[in-house]
Image (cartoon, grey):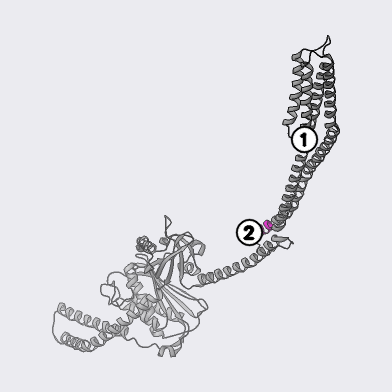
Amino acid sequence: MKRKVLIGLITLSLCFTFGGLYITEAMNGVIDNLQNIILLQQVGFQRKTLLTQIKEVQTDLLLKDSPHATSLDTFVRHGEAVEDSLNSCLDCHHPPNLQENISSLATIVEAYQKKLSKVYTLRANTRRLTEAKKSAYDAGEHLQYELNKLFLGADEKIATSTTHARQSIAASRQLLIFFVTIGPMIILVAYFYFFGRFSRAVTILSGAIKKVQGGNLDYRIREKLDDEFHQLASSFNNMGISLKEQCRLVESIQQRYRILFESAGDAIFIMEAEGDNAGRIISANKAAADMHGYSVDELHDMNISELDDTKSTTEIPARIRRILNGEWIKYMVTHKKKDGTTFPIEASAGLLECDSHKYVLAFDRDISERVKAEEALQRARQLAMVGEMAAGLAHEIKNPLAGIKVSIEILASELTLAQEDKEVFLRVIQEVNRLETLLKNLLNYARPPKPYFDAGDLNVLLLDSVKNAKMTLQSPNYFSEKKKDIQFITELAPDIPPVSADFAQLQQIFLNLLLNGIEAIPRAGTITVKATWNHNSMIQVTIADTGKGFDEEGLLKAFHPFYTTKPKGSGLGLAITKRLVELHHGQIDLISKKGAGAAFIITLPVKHHHEEVER
């Protein structure tokens, strides 16, 4: 296409150049012809003027010595006019042959002037004057003859030149009309030819570009285009193929990263790092939503401070400043779920820059299980320490206590004592019994007997435990001031299958929790016992009371050994209960609020493998 346009432009340029040169030459020829015509007209006019002047001189010559003779001055002036006219012809530029003829004519005029002068100078001799007059007249006639002879055919040349000039002018006018009319038409034809081809190609290409901009990467130019536009269409089609392949690769990479992002086990957050919205969550994965109890859409546009525990929200700006300084930080913090419960996490966060914008990329891992494992390890160490201490106490204290107890009993039975003194001895014996019970509980916590698993009915065991608690409540030795009014409610699922467990240890667990509930209720209240089974491998038993409940410290330390809120408690009851539940591969949880009672939830497996217990 470019070559065709170039050839067309060169052709038009040559045509107009040669046409212009031709018109210029034609106009120059016309001008030359017109100049020749003008020159011939001037020559003819000068010839007529010279002839007229010669005739005037001839007339003056004939009228000499007559009444009508002209004056001498007039005669001289007429003669000088002939000479001046001839001299003006000599001053013009003529061809060499014409210039030679005019020079000879000037010689004749000079001779004619001399004869005229002689006529006016001779006065005495009439015969000689007549001869001079006749000679001068004959010279004048000869001059007219030579003049007519010299310019003979000038009129024909003028007519021929005029006709030729008119023909040249007509031809030039026709040529100008041709170029003026045909030239623009040629230009228009060339313009529409090239413009049509160019416009069609541009329309097809622009339409294809709009298709691709609209997302149709499969669109290809099928129309046949010429010249460079064909190459451009091929390049466009190749670009579409390459662009589609690149988009496929980008989509594949994005899909892989999206899968990694969505399937990651740890919570991933992308947050704003700058401005007033620093900390606002831009994106979060499913693990983050599940970890915090929200949906992914709910997490979007929340601020990370809404997930952090209140105690740690003040540290967020400082952490963001460290990240903006290029530091990749690791920290431990407490997060809270949608329901308000808290859990510990281990987080690592760093700077993420995308499209000249700064974000915080954070990875959060729930370490509740690890914290529990560490607590379990700590309890195991405590148990080992308690076991060693219990063994030493059993050896060092048990025998002396037995001797003290026997000695006091003998003294109390053999001595004659006042009633007040006997009560002192009895109080000593009771304290010794309490010490023996404490040592027994300590040994049971440190080195509990291995459970003996047997299948049984859990509902029957729970009902028996409730009956024992009622009997204990009705015992006159249990309360000292006022009898408590406590109602026992049982909600036991009838379809619970036989449970593999050590029922003696389970009864110890349930009875201990029931007695704790009785002690937690000041005067009147309710103790509810529930047992449920959701047709899986686990059974859940809930023992809830309406007592005084636990405060925050009590919730954290309730199952720790030697922690108690009772004036005479040993702090080993709940610790032993938790240990026995763990020996059954179960779990015990406490839900309580200060002044709103407490609920112990025990989760036990339906079946056990004795090999696991032996290990």
What segment carries the magenta color?
A: 205-210
Q: Say what amino acid the circle numbered 2 marks.
A: Gln
Q: Residue at x 77, y 49 (%)?
A: 189
Q: Main secondary structure of the magenta part?
A: helix
Image marks 1 and 2: residues in contact by CB distance under 8 Å: no
Q: Amino acid at mark 1?
A: Glu
Q: Which mark is residue 100?
A: 1
Depth check: give the residue in front, 135 or 99. Answer: 135
The label number, if any, that marks residue 213 in the structure image: 2
Residue 53's quadrant in the figure?
top right
Give the quadrant of the C terminus.
bottom left
The CA span between labels 1 and 2 is 91 Å
Closest to the observer, 145 or 196: 145
Q: Give coordinates of residue 217: x percent, y percent.
A: 65, 64
Q: Quadrant of the N terminus?
A: bottom right
On the rendered structure, is 136 left or right of 204?
Answer: right
N-terminal of the two: label 1 or label 2? 1
Q: For the residue carrying disc 1, how many other residues have a C-alpha within 10 Å: few (<14), some (14-19), or many (20+)?
A: few
SS for callout 1: helix
